Amino acid sequence: MYYLREDDYLTRQQRALAETVRRGRSKRSFQLAEHLAAEGGVNRSDVLAVTAFFLAWRAIRQGDTAAARQYARQLRGLDRGSIDLARQLVRLEAGREQGWLPRVQHDELYSYAWRENRPDLLAKASLIQPRDVPAAGWWADLEQSLSLLPA
């Protein structure tokens, strides 16, 4: 009989969460996030914050600012450190997708990675080019929608 190792199970759960967020299935995404927190030893506030941020990111990319604001309201009850982690992960993904970030966000991402001793984020951020431009387009919309959150 073949027994799955715990990390295989957690990997499958993480992939399921990523897929439900990608599809925009809000309720199911939060259910999976809660499950990962309970079963996987993942910090509850971190996983909920990242889930809400990525759902907000998806909503903004689809032009649904009302949904993005709803996700921002859900974040208010979570730990400030979790919100900061989620903000930086969204910036990292946005930068990886387009190959660059406005210099201010790029510098904040690097500062966060150094402060939190996250060499994994530093390595990924090093592949992103900083540009001396203000945030614009969907990224600016996301930042604006989430501006009510503490920085």
Image (tube, rainbow, N blue to C red):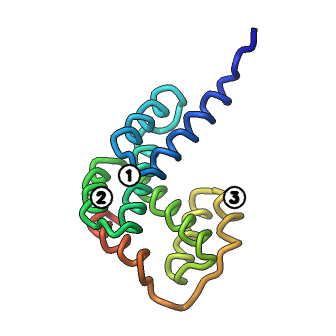
- Circle 1 Cα neighbour tier, 10 Å, few/some/many (<14 / 14–19 / ≥20): many
Q: Residue at x 44, y 59 (%)?
A: 84
Element assignment for label 3: helix
- Residue under label 3: 119
Q: Report if the CB atoms under discs 1 and 3 are less than 8 Å apart.
A: no
**Left or right, residue 14 beside residue 65:** right
Q: Report if the CB atoms under discs 1 and 2 are less than 8 Å apart.
A: yes
N-term-proximal mark, 3 vs 2? 2
- Residue under label 2: 72
N-term-proximal mark, 1 vs 3? 1
Q: Amino acid at mark 2?
A: Ala
Q: Percent x, y for residue 104?
A: 50, 81
Residue 67 or 79: which is nearer the viewer? 67
- Residue under label 1: 52
- Circle 3 Cα neighbour tier, 10 Å, few/some/many (<14 / 14–19 / ≥20): few
Residue 112 or 86: which is nearer the viewer? 86
Q: CA distance from mark 1 to mark 3?
A: 24 Å
Q: Is residue 43 above or below residue 111?
A: above
Q: Is residue 67 above or below residue 8?
A: below
Element assignment for label 2: helix
N-term-proximal mark, 1 vs 2? 1
Q: Quadrant of the N terminus?
A: top right
Element assignment for label 1: helix
Q: Amino acid at mark 1?
A: Ala
Q: Residue at x 30, y 58 (%)?
A: 72
Given this view, does label 1 or label 3 mark the residue nearer the observer? 1
Q: Percent x, y for residue 49?
A: 40, 50
Q: Amino acid at mark 3?
A: Pro
